[in-house]
Image (tube, rainbow, N blue to C red):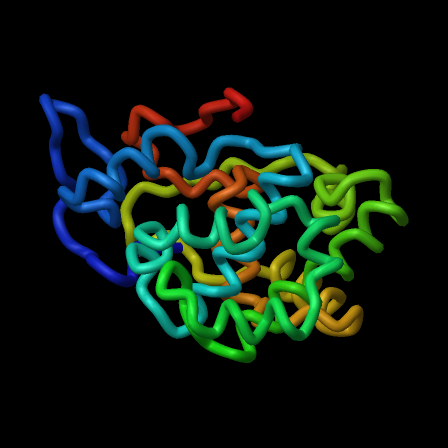
Protein backbone atom coordinates (compact mmCIF):
# COMPACT_ATOMS: atom_id res chain seq x y z
CA UNK A 1 0.00 0.00 0.00
CA UNK A 2 1.27 3.46 -0.89
CA UNK A 3 -1.01 5.24 1.58
CA UNK A 4 1.39 5.24 4.50
CA UNK A 5 3.30 7.97 2.68
CA UNK A 6 0.51 10.55 2.69
CA UNK A 7 -2.45 9.66 4.89
CA UNK A 8 -4.97 12.44 4.93
CA UNK A 9 -8.22 13.56 3.41
CA UNK A 10 -9.21 12.18 0.04
CA UNK A 11 -8.37 14.55 -2.77
CA UNK A 12 -10.76 15.71 -5.45
CA UNK A 13 -10.07 16.34 -9.11
CA UNK A 14 -13.02 17.86 -10.95
CA UNK A 15 -15.30 16.44 -8.30
CA UNK A 16 -13.80 12.95 -8.38
CA UNK A 17 -12.91 11.28 -5.12
CA UNK A 18 -9.93 8.98 -5.14
CA UNK A 19 -8.15 6.84 -2.61
CA UNK A 20 -6.40 9.09 -0.12
CA UNK A 21 -2.82 8.01 -0.83
CA UNK A 22 -2.42 9.59 -4.26
CA UNK A 23 -3.00 13.08 -2.86
CA UNK A 24 -2.84 15.77 -5.54
CA UNK A 25 0.37 14.72 -7.32
CA UNK A 26 -0.48 14.36 -11.05
CA UNK A 27 1.82 11.36 -11.48
CA UNK A 28 0.28 9.61 -8.49
CA UNK A 29 -3.27 10.37 -9.68
CA UNK A 30 -2.56 9.05 -13.15
CA UNK A 31 -1.04 5.87 -11.70
CA UNK A 32 -4.04 5.43 -9.39
CA UNK A 33 -6.59 6.00 -12.15
CA UNK A 34 -4.99 3.96 -14.94
CA UNK A 35 -3.06 1.19 -13.23
CA UNK A 36 -3.35 0.60 -9.49
CA UNK A 37 -5.66 -2.28 -8.70
CA UNK A 38 -6.43 -3.21 -12.32
CA UNK A 39 -5.98 -6.96 -12.91
CA UNK A 40 -2.73 -7.87 -14.65
CA UNK A 41 -1.97 -11.22 -16.26
CA UNK A 42 0.88 -10.32 -18.60
CA UNK A 43 4.24 -11.69 -17.47
CA UNK A 44 6.23 -8.69 -18.64
CA UNK A 45 4.00 -6.30 -16.68
CA UNK A 46 4.08 -8.51 -13.61
CA UNK A 47 7.87 -8.59 -13.76
CA UNK A 48 7.87 -4.81 -14.11
CA UNK A 49 5.87 -4.41 -10.91
CA UNK A 50 7.92 -7.03 -9.12
CA UNK A 51 11.09 -5.13 -10.03
CA UNK A 52 9.70 -1.72 -9.13
CA UNK A 53 8.16 -2.86 -5.87
CA UNK A 54 11.44 -4.52 -4.88
CA UNK A 55 13.31 -1.32 -5.71
CA UNK A 56 10.90 0.63 -3.50
CA UNK A 57 11.97 -1.17 -0.30
CA UNK A 58 12.82 1.57 2.19
CA UNK A 59 11.82 4.36 -0.21
CA UNK A 60 8.68 6.31 -1.13
CA UNK A 61 6.73 4.86 -4.06
CA UNK A 62 6.65 8.25 -5.78
CA UNK A 63 10.45 8.08 -5.98
CA UNK A 64 10.17 4.86 -7.96
CA UNK A 65 7.38 6.18 -10.19
CA UNK A 66 9.56 9.12 -11.13
CA UNK A 67 12.35 6.73 -12.09
CA UNK A 68 10.11 4.28 -13.91
CA UNK A 69 11.31 5.26 -17.38
CA UNK A 70 14.87 4.92 -16.17
CA UNK A 71 14.15 1.40 -14.99
CA UNK A 72 12.44 0.59 -18.27
CA UNK A 73 15.56 1.62 -20.19
CA UNK A 74 18.00 -0.01 -17.77
CA UNK A 75 16.18 -3.35 -17.69
CA UNK A 76 15.28 -3.92 -21.35
CA UNK A 77 11.67 -2.82 -21.12
CA UNK A 78 11.19 -5.35 -18.31
CA UNK A 79 11.75 -8.29 -20.63
CA UNK A 80 12.59 -10.77 -17.88
CA UNK A 81 14.37 -13.11 -20.27
CA UNK A 82 16.77 -10.39 -21.38
CA UNK A 83 17.25 -9.17 -17.82
CA UNK A 84 18.06 -12.73 -16.75
CA UNK A 85 20.97 -12.76 -19.18
CA UNK A 86 22.54 -9.55 -17.86
CA UNK A 87 26.14 -9.82 -16.67
CA UNK A 88 28.22 -8.54 -13.75
CA UNK A 89 29.52 -5.91 -16.16
CA UNK A 90 25.95 -4.75 -16.71
CA UNK A 91 25.47 -4.56 -12.96
CA UNK A 92 28.56 -2.40 -12.58
CA UNK A 93 27.40 -0.10 -15.39
CA UNK A 94 23.97 0.32 -13.78
CA UNK A 95 25.57 1.38 -10.51
CA UNK A 96 26.36 4.65 -12.30
CA UNK A 97 22.93 5.02 -13.88
CA UNK A 98 21.15 8.03 -12.38
CA UNK A 99 17.87 6.86 -13.89
CA UNK A 100 17.46 4.13 -11.27
CA UNK A 101 18.14 3.61 -7.58
CA UNK A 102 21.89 3.00 -7.55
CA UNK A 103 21.86 0.35 -4.87
CA UNK A 104 24.21 -2.53 -5.66
CA UNK A 105 22.12 -5.14 -3.89
CA UNK A 106 18.87 -4.01 -5.52
CA UNK A 107 20.44 -4.01 -8.98
CA UNK A 108 21.81 -7.49 -8.43
CA UNK A 109 18.48 -8.72 -7.06
CA UNK A 110 16.58 -7.43 -10.11
CA UNK A 111 18.69 -9.67 -12.33
CA UNK A 112 18.56 -12.62 -9.94
CA UNK A 113 14.81 -12.20 -9.55
CA UNK A 114 14.41 -12.21 -13.35
CA UNK A 115 16.03 -15.65 -13.53
CA UNK A 116 13.83 -16.97 -10.74
CA UNK A 117 10.76 -15.35 -12.31
CA UNK A 118 11.48 -17.25 -15.52
CA UNK A 119 11.68 -20.53 -13.64
CA UNK A 120 8.26 -19.91 -12.09
CA UNK A 121 6.78 -19.12 -15.52
CA UNK A 122 8.19 -22.41 -16.82
CA UNK A 123 6.79 -24.28 -13.83
CA UNK A 124 3.30 -22.73 -13.73
CA UNK A 125 2.78 -21.54 -17.29
CA UNK A 126 2.57 -17.90 -16.20
CA UNK A 127 3.45 -15.83 -13.16
CA UNK A 128 -0.21 -14.94 -12.69
CA UNK A 129 -1.07 -18.62 -12.27
CA UNK A 130 1.66 -18.89 -9.64
CA UNK A 131 0.29 -15.88 -7.75
CA UNK A 132 -3.28 -17.19 -7.84
CA UNK A 133 -2.14 -20.53 -6.44
CA UNK A 134 -1.97 -18.75 -3.07
CA UNK A 135 -5.56 -17.45 -3.31
CA UNK A 136 -8.70 -19.26 -2.14
CA UNK A 137 -10.33 -20.84 -5.21
CA UNK A 138 -7.57 -19.14 -7.26
CA UNK A 139 -9.68 -15.99 -7.46
CA UNK A 140 -8.70 -12.36 -7.00
CA UNK A 141 -9.97 -10.60 -3.88
CA UNK A 142 -12.03 -7.41 -3.62
CA UNK A 143 -11.75 -6.15 -0.05
CA UNK A 144 -14.29 -4.13 1.88
CA UNK A 145 -12.42 -0.85 2.48
CA UNK A 146 -14.65 1.80 4.12
CA UNK A 147 -11.66 4.01 5.06
CA UNK A 148 -7.86 4.08 4.97
CA UNK A 149 -7.63 2.56 8.44
CA UNK A 150 -9.17 -0.62 7.05
CA UNK A 151 -6.36 -1.28 4.59
CA UNK A 152 -3.82 -3.92 5.60
CA UNK A 153 -0.11 -3.87 4.86
CA UNK A 154 0.14 -7.66 4.67
CA UNK A 155 -2.05 -10.73 4.77
CA UNK A 156 -1.82 -14.50 5.15
CA UNK A 157 -1.60 -14.65 1.34
CA UNK A 158 1.33 -12.25 1.12
CA UNK A 159 2.94 -14.04 4.07
CA UNK A 160 2.75 -17.39 2.28
CA UNK A 161 3.74 -16.07 -1.14
CA UNK A 162 6.71 -14.04 0.09
CA UNK A 163 7.86 -17.00 2.20
CA UNK A 164 7.76 -19.27 -0.85
CA UNK A 165 9.56 -16.70 -2.98
CA UNK A 166 12.24 -16.29 -0.33
CA UNK A 167 12.81 -20.05 -0.40
CA UNK A 168 13.20 -19.82 -4.17
CA UNK A 169 15.85 -17.12 -3.72
CA UNK A 170 13.99 -13.88 -4.43
CA UNK A 171 15.33 -10.79 -2.68
CA UNK A 172 13.66 -7.56 -1.51
CA UNK A 173 10.23 -9.17 -1.57
CA UNK A 174 9.05 -9.54 2.02
CA UNK A 175 5.40 -9.76 2.95
CA UNK A 176 4.76 -5.98 2.93
CA UNK A 177 6.33 -5.52 -0.51
CA UNK A 178 4.50 -8.62 -1.70
CA UNK A 179 1.17 -7.23 -0.49
CA UNK A 180 1.86 -3.95 -2.23
CA UNK A 181 2.61 -5.91 -5.43
CA UNK A 182 -0.70 -7.77 -5.11
CA UNK A 183 -2.57 -4.49 -4.66
CA UNK A 184 -0.85 -2.81 -7.59
CA UNK A 185 -1.52 -5.68 -9.99
CA UNK A 186 -5.15 -6.17 -8.99
CA UNK A 187 -4.88 -9.53 -7.31
CA UNK A 188 -6.18 -7.67 -4.26
CA UNK A 189 -8.48 -4.69 -4.80
CA UNK A 190 -7.98 -2.27 -1.92
CA UNK A 191 -9.55 0.82 -3.46
CA UNK A 192 -11.81 2.59 -0.99
CA UNK A 193 -15.44 1.55 -1.31
CA UNK A 194 -16.45 4.99 -2.57
CA UNK A 195 -13.56 5.27 -5.02
CA UNK A 196 -14.84 5.29 -8.63
CA UNK A 197 -12.10 2.82 -9.55
CA UNK A 198 -13.26 0.17 -7.10
CA UNK A 199 -13.71 -3.25 -8.72
CA UNK A 200 -12.29 -2.15 -12.06
CA UNK A 201 -11.98 -5.37 -14.03
CA UNK A 202 -10.35 -3.81 -17.04
CA UNK A 203 -7.08 -5.51 -17.88
CA UNK A 204 -4.12 -3.46 -18.96
Q: Which residue is drawn at 52% across and 79% down?
A: 104
Q: Residue at x 55, y 24 (%)?
A: 203
Q: In this view, does 55 lie above or below 141?
A: below
Q: Is residue 4 above or below residue 31?
A: below
Q: Which residue is drawn at 68% across and 35% down?
A: 139
Please identify the residue farthest to the bottom as the structure is shown.
104
Residue 2 in picture, x, y percent from top left: 34, 55
Q: Which residue is drawn at 64% across and 72% down?
A: 89
The quadrant in which residue 15 appears is: top left
The answer to whether one can see residue 174 in this image is no
The answer to whether one can see residue 129 in this image is yes
Is 90 on the left or on the right of 164, as rendered?
left
The quadrant in which residue 101 appears is: bottom left
Quadrant in which the N terminus appears: bottom left
Residue 199 in picture, x, y percent from top left: 46, 27
Q: Is residue 31 above or below residue 94?
A: above
Is 40 on the left or on the right of 147, as rendered?
right
Residue 8 in picture, x, y percent from top left: 15, 53
Residue 35 in picture, x, y percent from top left: 42, 34
Closer to us: 204 or 20: 204
The quadrant in which residue 192 appears is: top left
Q: Is residue 145 above or below residue 199?
A: below
Amino acid sequence: MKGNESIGNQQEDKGMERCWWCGDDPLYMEYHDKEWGKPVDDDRTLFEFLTLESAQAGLAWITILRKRDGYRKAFHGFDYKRVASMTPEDEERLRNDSGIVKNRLKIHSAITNARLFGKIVEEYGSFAKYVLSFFPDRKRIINDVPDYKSVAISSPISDAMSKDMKKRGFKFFGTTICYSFLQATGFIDDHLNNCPFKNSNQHQ
